Image (cartoon, rainbow, N blue to C red):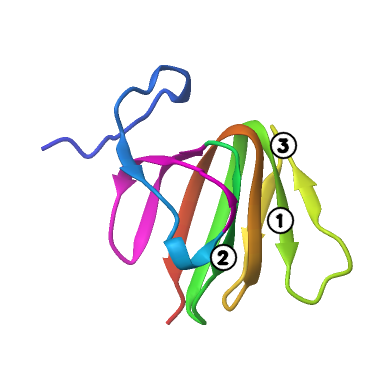
Amino acid sequence: MSKLKSARTADLDGGEPGLPDPGKLLDGAPEFRSWSLIEGPIAAGVWAATPGHHRVVRDSDLIESFYIVEGEVDLYEDGAAAPRRFGPGDLVVLEPGFTGSWKTISPMRKIYFTTTRA
């Protein structure tokens, strides 16, 4: 088995379909696709979403960093005065315990890495 894995983000097809938890959906009908490269305590891959708005609640141990390849999103952090917009070329980190919402403005793709802290 090869120890080298890759994904050409411009040429991805298929992927694992997903939807937000119905209890966390705020607006629209977003659909997700994911292409996992590594799974486990450390995970990495590509994730895509269509426009819509849903709640995000991270547990106290999960750290996610992601790089936006295409599209735009607004991240609303609970307690913050205004959302922050991110787009292609932006690197974002959601620290453990992040709560808020994710609004996909235009179809987007991100490269993500997650880990749990000890």
Residue 97 lies in the magenta stretch: no
The three-letter amino acid code for the residue at tag 1 is Leu
Q: Residues within 10 Å of mark 1 (few under 14, many from 20)?
A: some
Say which residue label 3 marks. Answer: 87
Q: Is residue 44 above or below residue 106?
A: below
**Crowding near the residue tagged with mark 2, few <14, some 14–19, many ≥20 C-alpha atoms within 10 Å:** many
Q: Is label 3 in contact with label 2 (beta carbons under 8 Å)?
A: no
The part of the chain drawn in magenta is 26-49
Helix, strand or loop under label 1: strand
Judging by the rendered image, the residue that carries numbered circle 1 is: 75
Determine the secondary structure under disc 3.
loop
State the residue position of label 2: 56
Which residue is at 51% across, 44% downward? Answer: 29
Sequence-first disc among 3 and 2: 2
Q: Is residue 21 above or below residue 10?
A: below
Q: How many marks?
A: 3
The N terminus lies in quadrant: top left
Nearer-the-camera pick, 38 or 110: 110
